[in-house]
Image (spheres, grey):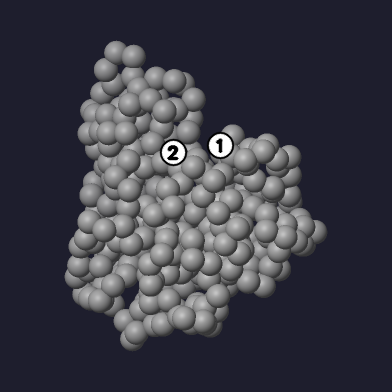
Amino acid sequence: MSKLQTEILTSDASGLATAADVLARGGLVAFPTETVYGLGADARDNRAVARVFAAKGRPSFNPLIVHVPDLAAAQSIARFDDISLELAQAFWPGPLTLVLPLRADSGIAPLVTAGLDTVALRVPAHPVGQALLHAFNGPIAAPSANPSGRISPTTATHVADGLGGKLDAIVDGGACTVGLESTIVGGTPPALLRPGGLPTEEIEKITGPLAKAGDTITAPGQIKSHYAPNAPVRLNANAAHAGEVLLGFGPMQSDLNLSITGDLIEAAANLFEHLHRLNDTGKPIAIAPIPNTGLGRAINDRLQRAAAPR
């Protein structure tokens, strides 16, 4: 891929109109959602979607999430059963992705689904993401806007640092508020395919206990090594070893702290930004234990993948 001149766009009407035009011409645009920044392409354009995989260095067997403005748009792409419809009505817009049977006439490019007969759909809650979807007036396929397997981006600067020169434009909408990718649910009975920014406990109030995902990749974010800094990561550390930097949680001495008060919502919002900052030191990263409840389950999922053998 030849190097592009990546344009930084404002999130006002003019910037969004430019971004929508880039997408309509088969270009790539990074944009904010409440979870992380997405690397967007027209989900109906196979060539544009191929550019997403090339820009990220993403394996083609790893499907993408399709972002749409509302439930009606999602229903034109996929078939909903009673439970998935109840989940959509309860949590959309928001950090929940549903993997659903793809309609034959959906128009979604085959690369988006990695050849599967299902599609991952989400309605983002971020006002800039919503405004771009309305300006473009079509579905946008968008994985996280970072090199495949590396730390996810929660600011426009993170995107530019990781993918500058590989996409056409970045819409700067400020820092993401949730800071973790969406929770993904799919299948019959419904299974947790990826923990994320919506706590599993909230979903299970509707579904009952969620089944566990199988070994086959059916949704984004299921590759074992993912979200990884350049340096090694050591988990469940109560102190740093010589030469390490320490990412803390709760009241403790550390180089950076996800939440000094032990607030998991604050920790989730800080996770990727703090990993980016510690990654910039070039030193191995030690990370304090995180409670495995609520959003802590999603944080621990990301940290385990960040520390996995590469």
Amino acid at dot 2:
Arg
Residue under the image location 73 percent in, 49 percent down: 9
* Vertical relation: 180 (above or below) 253: below
In x, y percent, where is residue 246? 34, 26
* Vertical relation: 291 (above or below) 136: above
Q: Earlier in the sequence, mark 1 or mark 2?
A: 2
Residue under the image location 29 percent in, 13 percent down: 242
Considering the image in quadrants, where does the N terminus appear? top right
Residue at image mark 1:
162
Q: Is residue 287 visible?
A: no
Residue at image mark 2:
150
Residue under the image location 39 percent in, 82 percent down: 80
Q: Secondary structure at mark 1?
A: helix
Residue under the image location 41 percent in, 28 percent down: 230
| Callout 1–callout 2 Cβ contact below 8 Å | yes
Q: Nearer the viewer, residue 195 or 176?
A: 195
In x, y percent, where is residue 272? 45, 41
Amino acid at dot 1:
Gly
**Label 1: how many residues lie within 10 Å, few (<14), some (14-19) or many (20+)?**
some
Q: CA distance from mark 1 to mark 2?
A: 9 Å
- Rendered image quadrant of residue 205: bottom left
Q: Secondary structure at mark 2?
A: loop
Furthest toward the right, the residue is 14
Tally of numbered tags: 2
Considering the image in quadrants, where does the C terminus appear? top left
